[in-house]
Amino acid sequence: MSDQRTQHKVVVWGTGNVGRTALRTVLAHRDLELVDVVVNNPDKVGRDAGTLAEIDPVGVLATNDAAAVLERRPDAVVYAASGDTRPDDALADILDCLRAGASVTTPAIYALLHPATSNERLLAKVNAACAEGGSSLYVSGIDPGWAQDILPLLVSGVAGQMDEIRVQELFDYSTYNAPEIVREVIGFGKPMDYLPPMLIPSVPTMIWGPMIHTMADGLGVTIDDIEESVERLALDAPVDTVQGRFDEGTQGAFRFEVRGIVDGESRLVVEHITRIAPHLAPDWPTPAAGKTGEHRLIIEGRPRIEMSIHATDDSDNPADGGNATAAARLVNAVPAVIGAENRVLGTLDLPPVVGGGLGQTFS
């Protein structure tokens, strides 16, 4: 009997740090067909998707005519354009996709990472678009979300007594070629009396609190409260990176925790430890030697479990390994999202998501 598999027609919208790796994952997936690429940069219009993905040409040319793309009725859109600095535009784009009948996977709308605790008006608006188009939306984290919800829940299945589940992202941003995010959103290179958007009180909870709630849902416990704390350090000397120079006295490192309180105790913790140069804050946890980034899971209890994950990618940007895993989660979820109920979906609404690129090539 022949293996009859459904080929879903997929659009990748955005070809930056996330979209570039999403393109490669779509092209390698046996059940997905790349039919269009949407770009905003006029210099990318007309360029081959393979070239934009840093592989051989594949015969799909990038366009900035999103309306024409949606008129061709794709099954799904992997929306990889940034929502950090253009949240209203990103939401409008995604609503257009949903109303046109294309299911969407994206990291761009943090407020919908955990539908049950999302803003009711926003949730209703997006659910209405899903109902109108017969489509579905799944939002996953880009830091990457899977390391802070799916992985802890999976590993909890081999744990016994658990006192705390802690997930960490350790990252050296000197290699991350996204100056607007690094300087304006994260605040590296800014004066210490400047509070960057990412560290404004309640913002870490807004972005990473949904991971806490997802873990709690999976474990069957109730979150009483979410607490957060932030610690920042200034550069003691100038440093030069791929984004240019960062001056002495400006923000050079920070760490924060978002803690889920269960029965009065901190039980579920997401922690980020972030630097603009690897030598900073040597007493804070650091990635393994020779690595610029690491995701670490620690389950305190009996037994104590610790796991470290490193992802690398064959590109000039060492950060692309982590981006690739976040993008791959969004791409590999596409078949499940297409087949799901027409609404905003949470991580636990999906069946187990597996990869579709075993033995496949990009062509």
Image: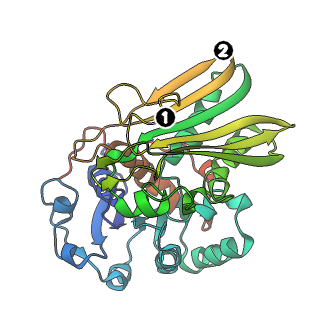
Q: Residue at x 50, y 64 (%)?
A: 108
Position of residue 144 measured from the top left corner of the image (x, y, whole percent):
48, 47
The residue labelled by disc 2 is 303
Q: Residue at x 43, y 42 (%)?
A: 236
| Residue placed furthest toward the left | 56
Q: Answer above or below: position of 15 versus 232.
A: below
Which of labels 1 and 2 is toward the front?
Answer: 1
Position of residue 221 measured from the top left corner of the image (x, y, whole percent):
80, 39
* Mark pair 1, 2: CA separation: 30 Å
Q: Answer above or below: position of 109 versus 93.
A: above
CB under 8 Å between discs 1 and 2: no
Position of residue 76 measured from the top left corner of the image (x, y, whole percent):
42, 66
Identity of the amino acid at label 1? Ala
The image shows a total of numbered marks equal to 2
Q: Residue at x 71, y 42 (%)?
A: 259
The residue labelled by disc 1 is 281
Query: Can the viewer see residue 339?
Result: no
Of residue 47 and residue 88, the one placed in the foreground of this image is 88
Position of residue 216 measured from the top left corner of the image (x, y, whole percent):
73, 42
